[in-house]
Amino acid sequence: MQIEYLAHASIDKNKWDQSILNADNGMLYACSWYLDCVSPGWEAIIANDYEYLFPVPVKRKYKIPYIVQPFLAQQLGLFGRGTISESMVQAFLNKLPSYSYEINLNYANSCVDAVSMTNLILPLQSSYEELRAAFSTNTLRNIRKATKQHYNFTLLEIDVFIKVYRSVEHPDTTVSMDLIEKLIRTGAEKGYLHCYALVSENGTVVSGLVYGRFKNRISYLFPVSTTEGKLSSAMFQLVDELLKKHAGSGLVFDFEGSMVDGVARFYAGFGAQPEIYHIVKQLRPSFLVGKI
């Protein structure tokens, strides 16, 4: 296998995107347009003329390269067709241009001394009735609570979603709202991101969700609920409507997991199952600790 490191300007993005689409483990996060948004100037390691792809979200400080997982991209790592062995992953890691890195590999990658993380997914092979049978009692209770409000489940224009999203206070302020908006608009224009919402009888959006659709995965990306939506548990109904819409499709509903207990319980309440991915870390030189 001939492994090659590419600077950003040398990446053929058409070949890259076609290979990610063809990869057995291809994910939305690895599309070139997605990486352009979350990690401008990203670089890459490829093998066999784009048969295997490893995006490198590199940054530089004092001209020294270092690599950190970008916000809004849960899993990257090595993508390709067929089985990806541990030795293959290590061979690509050995080509990284830095002694300092922290990278979330994807669910199809494994690596020695990696940290295990739990994602939550729900396969949608079954009928809606079968899926609903696995919902928790609390989830069913909250769905019933929301449906009493007679909300309308509908497609929502991206401009309207962004206006609502910006109007609501978010507990996590580490991600720039401008970056989120850029990612949503770009993904929607390219046909990969979609938005559904629950709207009250007076036309007010109470809950909305921008989700990704790539290959066989539906990715739960940007949820929002207004004060009314939170009080009425509208997000429970919104997810329920989406599961109803895609039940029996053979797709996978990817909740993206969460380290927050309450959020993880929300996902698990729909019958979501654990899917493991790994984080690989190598400490940066001591003289840079605290500086980058």
Image (tube, helix red, strand yellow):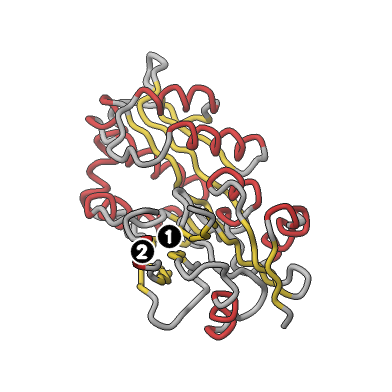
Q: Residue at x 40, y 44 (%)?
A: 239
Query: Which residue does the numbered mark 1 point to in the structure image?
Result: 122
Q: Residue at x 57, y 43 (%)?
A: 37
Q: Nearer the viewer, residue 3 or 143?
A: 3
Image position, residue 87 (x, y; %): 56, 86
**244 up-or-down from 30: above or below:** above
Image position, residue 65 (x, y; %): 52, 60
Three-letter amino acid code of the residue under disc 1: Leu
**214 up-or-down from 144: above or below:** below
- Please tell me in which quadrant of the rendered image residue 46 appears: bottom right
Tell me if 161 is positioned left or right of 266 in this view.
Answer: right
Q: Which label was assigned to residue 251?
A: none
Q: Nearer the viewer, residue 148 or 205?
A: 205
Tell me if 163 is positioned left or right of 33 in this view.
Answer: left
Tell me if 201 is positioned left or right of 76 in this view.
Answer: left
Query: Which residue does the numbered mark 2 point to in the structure image?
Result: 287
Three-letter amino acid code of the residue under disc 2: Phe
Image position, residue 12 (x, y; %): 77, 56
**183 up-or-down from 247: above or below:** above
